[in-house]
Image (cartoon, grey):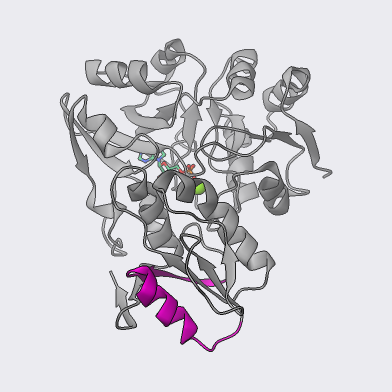
Amino acid sequence: MITKLAKADDSLIDEAAKILKDGGVVAIPTETVYGLAANALDVEAVRSVFRAKGRPQDNPLILHIGSVDMLYDIAETVNPLALKLAEAFWPGPLTMIFPRKPHIPAETCGGLDTAAVRMPKNNFTLKLIEKCGFPLAAPSANTSGKPSPTSAVHVFDDMNSKIPLIADGGDCRFGVESTVICFDSNERVRILRPGAVTPEMLLEFCDTVIDSGVLEKIKPDVKVISPGMKYKHYSPEAEVFILMGESDCVERFLSSQNAENIGFLGHGDEKLPESVMRFPYGKSSEVQAENLFASLRKADEYGCKTVYVRMPETVGMGLAVYNRLLRAAGFRVIDAGDGEDNAV
Ligand code: AMP
Ligand code: MG
């Protein structure tokens, strides 16, 4: 199959909508990462998405909607808190989990009786959903396990010859996937995956708990609310380690490494040996989120065997960065001060 890469503007909407209506798959831009979209109500189309990604069948997809009206076609019940959060954060990077109506295919939802729903903040994609008239099931448009794509070229690298069309909407604004929440009660939400809608932002509206799976490795036999939590994620070919400590310790640690092909994602002002390859990362959590996946992909392109990434903040958007990094690093955190490898 030839994969077309075309600018995501109004002139592409009819073509993209036709592919989707015919049961095909289209990569779409969103404000978080690129999505691999299909008609969420068409079982065969949804199967094509799982196939193209190599995604485990029990890992459910998020349904992307273009209006709150569409939510009522998917969710059996919508509690008042969900409506309040939709009003505050949609369109935007917040995914909410609802009991699903029977006509939503089990395949789309990984066999669960719930459906995850969000309204993305991207004009092209919102218009496309409106044109289609059905929700788009759209996981991140990467090969399963790899870093998520934050540009159309990343999608092309993973999906070339597997899908007919990539709509290029430029670089994604946030760079990490949406915040996923479920409702413990009508007053309390549980964060299953942190994102740009931060715990602090949710606390303005309701009690908020962070599920233990966000920062802890899930044991193989434990049942999780969000199946995505238990899989290997976001990993480049290179081995990734999180490096904890102040700049001087980090500098000393990296200077003492004599392995070749070492990559580093740091604040940008560390003094390092020439041999260490630096990739964009930054100091603020927002900039780190924007750069993280692209830099992990770049490290592979440059042939890095090992990549060290400076420990992010664990509040605000930093929690999302830390959550992705822990998985990319297989939960390995090194203390640059004593060189200890601390698996968390
Ligand atoms: P991705 O499609 O790569 O953005 O991943 C979607 C995430 O949302 C995965 O971690 C899924 O496990 C999670 N998810 C999707 N639908 C549900 C659901 N119905 N219940 C719980 N988690 C879900
Ligand atoms: Mg993903």
Outermost top residue: 69
The image shows a total of numbered marks equal to: 0
Q: Is residue 158 found inside the magenta-colored segment of the image? A: no
Q: Residue at x 37, y 23 (%)?
A: 89
Residue 164 appears at what percent x and percent y? 77, 38
Front residue of 103 and 323? 323
Q: Is residue 242 found inside the magenta-colored segment of the image? A: yes
Front residue of 151 and 20? 151
Front residue of 211 and 168? 168
Outermost right residue: 2
Q: Residue at x 36, y 43 (%)?
A: 317
The answer to whether one can see residue 247 in this image is yes
Would you say 332 lies left or right of 17 here? left
Residue 4 appears at what percent x and percent y? 81, 38
| Quadrant of the displayed image that contains ligand 1 | top left
Front residue of 50 and 319? 319
Residue 45 sits in which quadrant? top right
Residue 230 sits in which quadrant? bottom left
Relative vertical location of residue 244 with respect to residue 166 in this rendering, above or below:
below
Would you say 296 lies left or right of 318 here? right
For the C terminus, the quadrant is: bottom left
The answer to whether one can see residue 77 in this image is no
Relative vertical location of residue 235 with respect to residue 116 in this rendering, above or below:
below
Would you say 29 lies left or right of 211 here? right
Residue 95 appears at what percent x and percent y? 39, 32
For the N terminus, the quadrant is: top right
Q: Residue at x 71, y 47 (%)?
A: 153
For the magenta stretch, what is the residue range?
237-260
Residue 203 sits in which quadrant? top left
Residue 54 appears at what percent x and percent y? 59, 54
